[in-house]
Amino acid sequence: MSEESIPVEKKTQAMQNNHSVKREIILIQPTTRWSEQITTRHPLTLPIPISLLTIASYLSDYTVHIVDQRIDHHWVKTLQRLLRRNPLFVGITAMTGRQIHFALNASAIVQKINRSSNTKVPVVWGGPHASLLAKQTLEHPLVDFVVVGEGEETIKELADKMSVGGDLSGIAGLGLKFNGTENYEHNSEHREVDKYKINPERKFIKMDEMPPLPYHLLDMDKYLSPKFSCRPIGIPASRGCPNRCAFCYDTTVHRSCWRAFSAERTLDEIETVITRFGINFIYFFESNSCVNIQRIKEIASGIIERNYVRDYGLTWEGLAEIKTLRNVDYDFYALLEKSGCRILRIGIESGSPRILDMIHKDLTPEEAIRVNKQLARFNIRPYYSFMNGFPTETGSEIKMTVDLMFRLRKDNHRAQFCPINTLMPYPGTELYDTAVKSGFTPPETLEGWIDIDSFDVMNKANFRMPWIKPHRAKQFEKMFYLSLFMDDKSKTIDNPLLNLAINAYKPIALLRLRKLMLGLMPEYAIYNSLSKTL
């Protein structure tokens, strides 16, 4: 029997008409970018789909299926099988960039099954991109609804009203399509839509009132590779950030508001994952761990008091800002170290005081140097991120960023660095508005955003910003490549021959980066070719 002729299972449909049987809902985690496909050949530890788990925690009255394209390499067949059960709807999350491509693939499968089986299973899009560009997302024929902002309560109300045939038009945080008679219709491929309605967002959720995460919906072993002794997992701890960085869409999606689980709730979540899944490394799904210093102290003290370090060998990482760490003392770092904190991710972004001021980082290079020296006294690894490609950035300011990186590396042998990324101004950010004023033409369709992806430095669409000239774009690509050699990350590679080659080339790479010797680089052509092959 062909895919297009697969009928809906009549028995299942009849069961679902019985109110004693839970209706089913499918939630899909699309692949983030092409490179995740290599997990078939090289098992890695992947983050659990935390946003879908939080949505599912509000849907206890329904049978929820999570389809994760990153780990289910037969996800198409999985989705087809689940669609034959005539679910209430399919929910899909997507960030701006290549995740949209894979989300649209899933949406197309839903529509194909709808046509062949004469069903009307709607597709609901949520996540950052749908929140930032709700109307454009909703205009796509493969999208029936969008959820704007925090989706948990919106999805719950949508499910409850859909299951009883209720009115959907007034659901807060929901975007929907209407026909000329003001009635909702979905699967709009063969009709004209006369009206789009985006309802106002909901008030923010009270964090400690959120239900516990339904980990039973995931096959956790698939996210925890047996290849590594370290068993890491990410858990939610807070949402939003009070900072006003000009490149970050938290200022729009979370309206520069920071909210957090209490220290007690966070500690209970840590206990759940270490006792149920043998976790020994925690990282927090959040934008900033140290907004409230007293809270992070309570979490660190609780980890010690509950003996998680002694009994489970627990270590963890957090996220911090220089503007916060410049005001803490020795005892703060000592407490974090004792509680098992081994990594602090810190965004510095530039070595230029002018650029730092322009993007509202509220820090100076001198403060970054001072904090880095303080951290050098502890067994806590700072993991720094830097960017280039800011509007009006000069060559000398690019050199300031490289110089600051090498200064931090010199002062703290534990320091690690993300590769130098090129700025991608996302919708909803101040720098996006700057880009538009400078001549950037935003894509007019949902598909147009697929190539606007800051995670894929080899994608030339990253360098479409009007102020970045072709020769500078090529330099940025090479700086990304060379900055991979700034630290000892290669020690985690389980390939002696490759490690030998990396260690032999590392001094050359560092010399090139320090001096910005970015002309003839035959080794970069080899790297670029290998990257495209993967």
Image: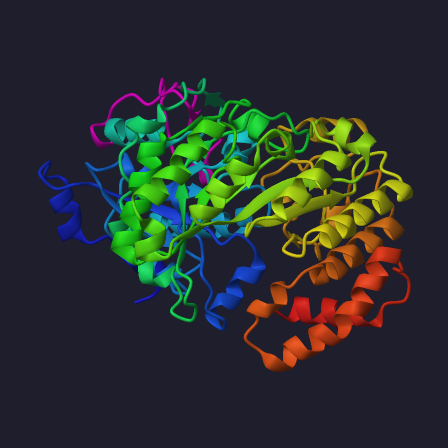
Does residue 309 appear in the picture of this structure? Answer: yes
Q: Is residue 185 left or right of residue 250?
A: left
Asked whether, in this view, residue 355 is left or right of residue 62, the answer is right
Near-viewer residue (132 or 303):
303
Is residue 520 found left or right of 211 in the rendered image?
A: right
Question: Is 175 part of what is drawn in magenta?
Answer: yes
Picture quarter with the C terminus: bottom right
In the rendered image of this protein, does residue 446 appear above or below residue 456?
above
Regarding residue 89, the answer to whether it shows in the image is: no
Q: Position of residue 213 (x, y in %)?
A: 29, 42
Position of residue 70 relative to residue 205, above or below, is below
Q: Residue at x 91, y 62 (%)?
A: 519
Image quadrant where residue 456 sits: bottom right
**Most common secondary structure along the magenta stretch:** loop
Q: Which residues are magenta?
A: 163-192
| Viewer-side residue, 101 vs 334 | 334
* Residue 278 rendering spot, x and y as whole percentages: 30, 58
Residue under the point 29% across and 21% down:
167
Q: Quadrant of residue 88?
A: top left
Query: Would you say residue 529 sits in the magenta stretch?
Result: no
Q: Could you tell me how many numbered marks the image carries?
A: 0
**x 79%, y 26%: residue:** 437
